[in-house]
Image (cartoon, rainbow, N blue to C red):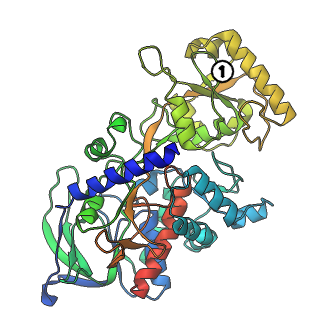
Amino acid sequence: MQSHLISRRSLIRSSLIGLACSAAPAISAAEKDDWTETYDVVIIGSGFAGLAAAYSALENGVKSVLVLEKMNVFGGNSCINGGQISLAGSGLQKSKGIKDSPKLMEEDMLRVGQRLNHPALVKAVVKESPACYDMMVKCGVKFADQVIRLGGHSAPRTIFAENYAGGGICVPMHKWLKDHGVEFRNKSFCSAVLTDKDGVVRGVEVEGQYDFDKKTHKNTYKVQAVKGVVFATGGWGADNEFISASTPQYSTLESTSQKGATSESVRMLLGLGAMPVLLDIYQVGPWATPDEFGAGAASIFADYIFAEGIMVDARNGKRFVNELASRRERSEAEMKCVDQQGKPVMPFGFCSEETTVNRPGFKASFREGTVKKFDTVEVLAKFYGAPLEPLKQQIAEWNKMVAAGKDELFGRPLDKRVELKAPFYAMRFWPKLHYCMGGIGINDQAQVISTKTCKPIPHLYAAGEITGGVHGLDRLGSCSSTDCFVMGRIAGRSVAANL
């Protein structure tokens, strides 16, 4: 009941945000001879969702595609993430005999999202997720021979780009698309959506040679989009002004996003009358650490600490949560680790040396000092200020549960049993703002929904983190990539059909 009360408040606040942003740029279309240039499809944003939309548009017969990126470099947050994606039914899963299904992944997403997900969007994502693997492989993406289970998943279904970075996906897909005729322009800011008198989206206004830091540009031009415009601009995790206005409680949290993750596009679409969905709901990452900027190598290695080691409260040396629970559950548990004045007493996680062998993120985070080595439990306890005897007892209790193959305390899955023994490798944890759960409302064809009609705004599509509804109140690890690729593919297909 409580989550539904929260959701109703959230929807009310989200609607108010939409009204507050109603002055955002959305101007009438240019006359026919006023267009600077014409393309079949214009895509705003060059991350996973934009790349998938471009691929799908080509696959469905579109002849000319323009991808606009406001930053100096392409890829956005997609390019700097861990290169992870969760797929139910990928070729890698099948090669390892892992039993999984779209239905099981659907249920996981609904459970973690507290069933405030839009069911049709969840079904669309899980149904098409295996096709994303084939698409990426066709574009030259290489994957590590590894499938792991992240928090909240009922089966190991997360795969990695071979270099364990989002660039390992973005770069080959970008190259493949360019080789097949897609035009990419960086430093190109979409400053307005252009509509005709009937509200049909006809194109966009672009500020060329855009300097994000100075907020300046050298020229302005108008691009006609014959079939439609796709927004794939991601979230706004680096926009403290927007976050402070929507959810003041998170205004002091650090963010894992790159600096270009700001709210211009979501404000623009709200001003056009797009439906707001859970705009004040954010996800914070429990694997984040205050000892590195954003989400770096240590945050990637943290998943292995959670899977094979333990996380303890530095105040008492005891475990306090299922280390493979949902991100929201773990983050909320971590943020309760405070002293009597309410100041953080950051928990720490640690694992055995066996867990560090050939694991992504370990070498870099160890070299940088974010992950530290401790030869004895005494040194480990002293460094983090934890009481020695309770910590020793916790390690002994954990090793008994590992031997028995069952976590008696929190019910954590034990896909691989690793005894905790010195030397230990450890890091501190404290959540960071990671993902915008809400966004612009779309249907299962990736069409943007109007607040005025509750029907699609003609020729306007969106995919990825700028949208809301796929994940509800929380999302599973690496399912943002799945969302981007699937809904990007659907957006490309829909705009090609001119739905």
Q: Is residue 161 visible?
A: no
Check disc 1: other Cα within 10 Å, few if <14, some if 14-19, many if 20+: many
Q: Could you say where residue 155 lies in the image, as x and y percent from the top left?
A: 72, 53
Quadrant placement of the C terminus:
bottom left
Looking at the picture, how far across and down is residue 104, in whole percent? 69, 60
Q: Residue at the location (66% across, 51% down)?
A: 153
Q: Name the residue under label 1.
A: 318
Vertical side of 51 occupied by 237: above or below: above
Q: Tell me if residue 317 comes above or below residue 245 in the rendering.
A: above
Residue 68, percent across and down?
31, 69
Q: Which residue is drawn at 79% across and 29% down?
A: 419
Give the residue displayed 32% in from the left and 38% down from the top.
Answer: 248
> Percent from the top left, x then y, of residue 391?
68, 16
- The amino acid beneath tag 1 is Lys
107 shown above or below 140: above
Number of labelled discs?
Answer: 1
| Occupied quadrant, residue 270 | bottom left
Q: Is residue 107 visible?
A: yes
Q: Is residue 447 left or right of residue 352?
A: left
In the rendered structure, the answer to whether residue 476 lies left or right of residue 77 reads: right
Question: 159 and 196: which one is in front?
Answer: 196
Occupied quadrant, residue 363: top right
Residue at 49% across / 75% down in the picture?
490
Q: Quadrant of residue 440?
A: bottom left
Tag 1, which secondary structure? strand
